[in-house]
């Protein structure tokens, strides 16, 4: 099968690997509020009769819940390398709704290059998706690597008429997962392309702590800025792409990978007999594509913004194996706070942006944990 409607308002599709991964939903209600989340149901389906050999078919569905009712039309195109769904919905609010999520999707991120807290297995990475990608209404491209935080995190990225967003699985290398059961290197990405003006709102991302791969812990959706009142009617048109790669990508340099680890020492000198005097956390962000090689002789400038702490030991390294550049910096705390640190970086050359924007959220350890532990037994 290539498309599955799973219960409630969940559904999913495959690409040419025929490997299921993340799921979409018809609607999300009160996902992150002070009340109980509401899960609408698709209560009835109708199918247009397809002819033999057709690769496109149409599904109609009724959605129902305590707060809203709606009608959906799915025109599903089963192409050779991807499944594309044209989605049209008409919604009627029965009650005031604190938080309405349009084009919601649910995925899993347990551990990856940037987050290995619960990755004590033979698998280097375990995730259905590795990043949230956004193409903002102003044209800016954003890459936000996913996390498995110790505490639930909710972030809303404000926008006006977004061009697209999605949860992507861009690392397709089997050796990076070593999983012959889950086949995470084959999981599809999911990209949302609005087909009408959505106005002001936010791409909202919720990340929930998880201890393993069986618990979906990532939720993403579009949240309209305008409050939803009882009696309101709404309509949204959008296209879903289930594929290895999104249908569009930035012409600028793109983030390939994000890595984190021990900092506070010169690159090429891994601590041996002596650990650094001051504790720091290192971040290495790999960029590929765009005009990086042409920009290099003119000077590549990383523009780094932090909500707290300082970035030091900033390095720009050409990496021949992937023909790109690694931007590396060490984050040093300037307080004892354990509040999440919002990080933002893009590359600039002669005043012009030459890369998409990298966003990240780092969770500093408690002050008494900011030390290097030598666990060698010497006698």
Image: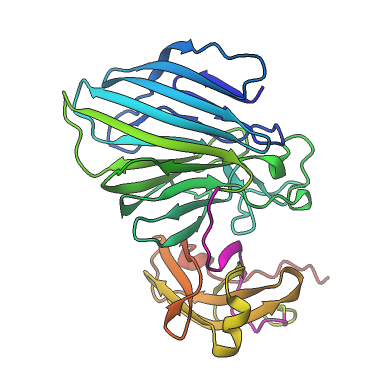
Q: Position of residue 323 (x, y in %)?
A: 71, 72
Task: Return the x and y of residue 138 as percentages of the image width and height.
Answer: 34, 60
Q: Position of residue 267 (x, y in %)?
A: 67, 81
274 is within the stretch colored magenta: no
Quarter residue 25 falls in: top left
**Magenta segment:** 247-269
Q: Is residue 179 above or below residue 262?
A: above
Q: What's the colour scheme?
A: rainbow
Q: Is residue 277 visible?
A: no
Q: Nearer the viewer, residue 49 or 265?
A: 49
Q: Residue at x 49, y 53 (%)?
A: 133
* Front in this rendered view, residue 250 or 180: 250
Residue 328: image x %, image y %?
A: 58, 76
Q: How many marks?
A: 0
- Residue 69 visible, this angle: yes
State the quadrant of the C terminus.
Answer: bottom right
Main SS category, magenta section: loop
Depth check, front residue: 25 or 272: 25
Q: Is residue 256 magenta?
A: yes
Residue reaching furthest to the right: 379
Name which residue lies at 29% across and 30% down: 235
């Amino acid at each position: 099968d290539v498309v599955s409607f799973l219960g409630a308002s969940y559904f999913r599709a495959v690409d040419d690997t025929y490997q299921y991964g993340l799921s979409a939903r018809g609607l999300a209600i009160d996902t992150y509020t002070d009340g109980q989340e509401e899960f609408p149901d698709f209560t009835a389906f109708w199918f247009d009769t397809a002819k033999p050999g057709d690769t496109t078919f149409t599904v109609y569905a009724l959605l129902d819940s305590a707060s809203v009712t709606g009608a959906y039309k799915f025109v599903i195109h089963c192409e050779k390398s991807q499944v594309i769904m044209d989605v049209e919905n008409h919604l009627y609010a029965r009650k005031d709704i604190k938080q309405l999520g349009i084009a919601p999707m649910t995925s899993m991120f347990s551990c990856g290059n940037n987050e290995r807290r619960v990755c004590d297995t033979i698998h280097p990475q375990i995730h259905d998706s590795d990043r949230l990608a956004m193409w903002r209404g102003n044209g800016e491209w954003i890459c936000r690597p996913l996390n498995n935080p110790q505490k639930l995190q909710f972030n809303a990225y404000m926008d006006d008429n977004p061009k697209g967003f999605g949860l992507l699985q861009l690392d397709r290398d089997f050796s990076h997962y070593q999983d012959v059961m889950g086949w995470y290197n084959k999981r599809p990405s999911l990209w949302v392309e609005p087909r009408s003006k959505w106005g002001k709102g936010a791409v909202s991302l919720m990340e929930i702590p998880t201890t393993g791969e069986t618990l979906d812990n990532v939720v993403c959706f579009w949240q309209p800025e305008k409050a939803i009142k009882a009696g309101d009617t709404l309509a949204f048109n959008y296209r879903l792409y289930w594929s290895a790669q999104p249908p569009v990508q930035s012409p600028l340099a793109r983030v390939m990978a994000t890595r984190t680890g021990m900092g506070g020492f010169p690159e090429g000198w891994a601590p041996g007999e002596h650990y650094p005097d001051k504790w720091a956390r290192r971040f290495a962000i790999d960029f590929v594509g765009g005009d990086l090689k042409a920009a290099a002789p003119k000077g590549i400038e990383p523009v780094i913004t932090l909500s707290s702490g300082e970035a030091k030991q900033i390095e720009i390294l050409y990496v021949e194996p992937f023909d790109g550049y690694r931007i590396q910096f060490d984050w040093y705390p300037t307080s004892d706070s354990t509040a999440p640190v919002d990080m933002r970086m893009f590359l600039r050359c002669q005043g012009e942006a030459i890369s998409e924007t990298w966003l990240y959220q780092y969770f500093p350890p408690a002050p008494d944990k900011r030390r290097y532990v030598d666990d060698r037994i010497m006698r």
